[in-house]
Amino acid sequence: MEFIDLKDAFIIDLALKIKDYLIISDLHLGYEQSLNAEGIMVPKFQYPHIVNRLNEIKKKSSCNKIIVNGDLKHEFGQISRQEWNETLEFLDYLKSNFEEIILIKGNHDNFTKFIARKMDLQVYENYSLDNSLITHGDKIPTKLNDYDVESIVIGHEHPCIGLRSGERVEKIKCYLTGKYKDWNLIVMPSFNFVTEGSDILQEKPLSPFLKKMKMDELEVYAIEDFEVFPFGKLKNITSFKDFY
């Protein structure tokens, strides 16, 4: 497993490490049940993948605190049976393995506070950590200039990169980094294993942070099998044959 230094944070697979905190984003627990309700038959498989991957990252990082940066669950307007079961089980797992748990509200987390309350946890709009502001990224925090930080860490975007060679397309989760006004911006990949995410080479950005930036100037760090591949600037990426 490779540690990549982003000045205020280290990439460790699909998590960031800041001080003794791990940060993960966009788990979307219950996603399979939502897809099944739409007629897309997907087995309920991702929960054990999430726990196993996080166990591996925790062992390598030696972190004893964790931040979930939004979208712990999937449904917008309700709490499905799968979400209740898996979210409570996951929070219980976190309590057994971490000394501190910080939950950040994402745009899918309208009802997450009710689940968190059962576990005596609070859901925050955003969270300051050392020299960074942790916020989900679906909206720009009010009074952003009041935060004495140099970096902003967001999720929400679910970035992946679809690298093409002829007819073949290989989608790989990735981090994005760049400058948002005077801040260093770090965009995290999703900690979700149902899909790789949104192809940043083909799809328009979702986050209002990214909509105000020059996407071509973003640096890309692809993640595959616990390895980190610095791909350079987005504008220079054309195919995956250059990187393997």
Image: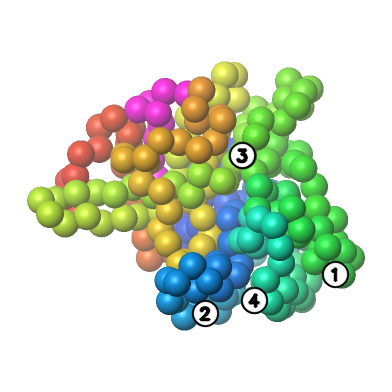
Q: Horizontally, is 63 left or right of 168 in the view?
A: right
Q: In the picture shown, does residue 157 fall above or below 190? A: above
Residue pointed to by mark 4: 82
Identify which residue is drawn at 76% across, 58% down.
111
Nearer to us: label 4 or label 1: 4
Instruction: Pick whichever, 223 or 29, lies toward us.
Output: 29
Residue pointed to by mark 1: 119
Tell me how far mark 2 sits from mark 4, CA to CA.
9 Å
Q: In the picture shown, does residue 136 fall above or below 179? A: below
**Precedes in sequence: disc 3 or disc 4:** 4
Q: Is label 2 in contact with label 4 (beta carbons under 8 Å)?
A: yes
Nearer to us: label 1 or label 2: 2
Secondary element under disc 3, as helix, strand or loop, is loop
Q: How many marks?
A: 4
Circle on res. 44: 2
Q: Which corner quadrant holds the N terminus?
A: bottom left
Q: Which residues are magenta?
A: 213-221
Amino acid, disc 1: Met
Identify which residue is drawn at 63% across, 61% down.
75
